[in-house]
Image (tube, rainbow, N blue to C red):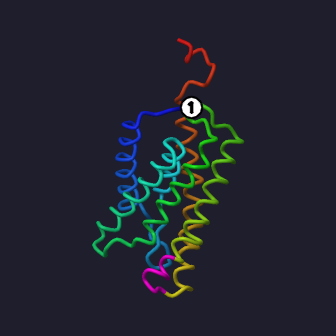
Amino acid sequence: MKRSPIVTVVAIGIGAALFFVLGRFVSIPSPVPNTNIALQYGLLAFMAALFGPVAGLLIGLIGHALIDFSYGWGVWWSWVIASGVFGCLVGLVSSKLKLADGEFEKKDILRFNLFQICGHIIAWGLIAPVLDIVMYAEPANKVFLQGLVGGVSNIVTTAIVGTLLCIAYAASRPRSGSLKEEK
């Protein structure tokens, strides 16, 4: 489904704002320092699946930068970049989903979750820790532990929140070829 660039820009603004609110006020601290159990990645995966890779990238970058900035410790760019990459990756591979056409069946749920798992592994198992080491000279054992905890918790929360958002959205849309669509 081709969308107006205006709709995509509005979606980026709303998505980044919601990502910020969820990440800043609804996250749960984990036992590993500087990592949280975050619900915003389910929203990001849903928005990326619906609006594509550019929207996913920008929602992740803007939303995560705003979260870091609001805490006052400065923007931790390695993780901001990883959030943007995750959104972009999910947006790229989710083009096979037909959420806007009201389709999100069991095979789509499986596909969505395989996409998000791969995206989180790349973002939190590779990009964030490597950039932490390169950009901030952080110890490898610390950042890979943070990446593991963040990645696993993000996979679980995205599987729950993201899947539920996709199911609800698809259920609200008329299915391709349905009588509702023909009217």
> At 58% across and 29% down in the image, what residue appears?
101
| Residue 18 x %, y % | 38, 50
Q: Residue furthest top?
A: 183
Residue 174 pos. (x, y %): 56, 24
The secondary structure making up most of the magenta span is: helix
Q: Which residues are magenta?
A: 131-138
The image quadrant of residue 103 is top right
Determine whether 179 is above or below 119 in the image. Answer: above
Residue visible at 64% across and 41% down?
Answer: 96
Please determine whether, in this image, residue 178 is positioned above or below residue 156. Answer: above
Using a 10 Å C-alpha cutoff, classify the residue at mark 1 as few (fewer than 14 neighbours), some (14 to 19) or many (20 or more).
some
What kind of residue is marked 1? Ala
Q: Looking at the image, which residue sits at the far right?
A: 107
Q: Quadrant of the N terminus?
A: top right
Residue 145 part of the magenta-drawn span: no
Residue linked to disc 1: 171
Place of residue 111 in the rendered image (x, y in percent of width and height, measured from the top left): 68, 47
Q: Residue at x 36, y 62 (%)?
A: 24
Q: Is residue 6 left or right of residue 156?
A: left
Which residue shows up at 56% across the image and 31% down it?
171
Q: Is residue 74 above or below residue 65?
A: below
With respect to residue 85, does 147 lie above or below? below
